[in-house]
Amino acid sequence: MRMISSFRRILFGLTLCSGLTSGPAWAAADQVEEIKQEQTKSRQEEQIKELRQKEQIENLKRDQQLNQAQQQLDQLKQQKVDPAGPQQPQAQQTQQQLDQLRNEQQIKRLQNELQLNQIQREQNQSRQQEQIRELQRQQQMDLLQDQNRKNQMQQDLDRLRQQP
């Protein structure tokens, strides 16, 4: 009987000790989780910053390409326009396309900035990560579409140069 009572006391003591040590273990686990969340948030903020920088670089490249196309078109207009006659319809059409492309790019810039601001406000980190990936995919598609339009416009300018 005495052995059973001693056994119960030892078991109770072990249970009590493990209960006392589990509190600090939970606190440490909470701290580790907080650190992980801060690191994830920091990485996501860095990704957003990189997205903004990449978008700015792409915007500058697009602007430069549009300015070059505008200069080429202006040169063609000066060479081909008779002072007494109206401007060539193809040159007018190319100018309209160029203006439309500029407007669309400005709208897209504003939309991207709004999306980035919305992503930064997202509290759910996995949702925020998904939104970042989606924006990256959309930016890549926009870049390819802009390149396609630029190539089409360049072909139009080349055709205008070849006309007498």
Image (cartoon, rainbow, N blue to C red):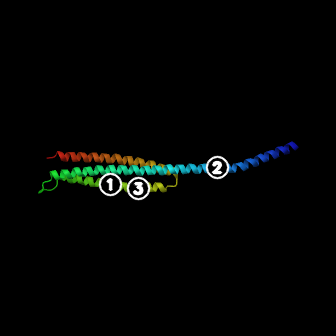
* Residue 40 pos. (x, y %): 52, 49
* Residue 58 pos. (x, y %): 36, 49
- Mark 3 and mark 1: span between their CA atoms? 14 Å
- Which mark is nearer the camera, 3 or 1? 3
The amino acid on which the numbered mark 1 sits, given as a three-letter code, is Glu
The amino acid on which the numbered mark 2 sits, given as a three-letter code, is Ala
The numbered mark at residue 164 is none
Residue 90 seen by the camera: no
Local packing at callout 3 (Cα closer than 10 Å; few below 14, some 14-19, many 20+) is: few
Name the residue at 24% across, 45% down.
155
Q: Which residue is mark 3?
A: 113
- N-terminal label among 2 and 3: 2
* Residue 85 pos. (x, y %): 12, 56
Residue reaching furthest right? 1
Q: What kind of element bears circle 2?
A: helix
Q: Are marks 3 and 1 in contact (CB under 8 Å)?
A: no
- N-terminal label among 1 and 2: 2
Q: Is residue 74 left or right of residue 109?
A: left
Q: Which residue is mark 2?
A: 28
Q: What kind of element bears circle 3?
A: helix
Local packing at callout 2 (Cα closer than 10 Å; few below 14, some 14-19, many 20+) is: few
The one nearer the camera, 71 or 82, is 71
- N-terminal label among 3 and 1: 1
Q: What kind of element bears circle 1?
A: helix
Name the residue at 31% across, 52% down.
63
* Residue 87 pos. (x, y %): 16, 55
- Which mark is nearer the camera, 1 or 2? 2
The amino acid on which the numbered mark 3 sits, given as a three-letter code, is Glu
Q: Is residue 134 left or right of residue 12?
A: left
Residue 109 seen by the camera: yes
Q: Which residue is mark 1?
A: 104
Check the picture and name the quadrant holding the N terminus. top right
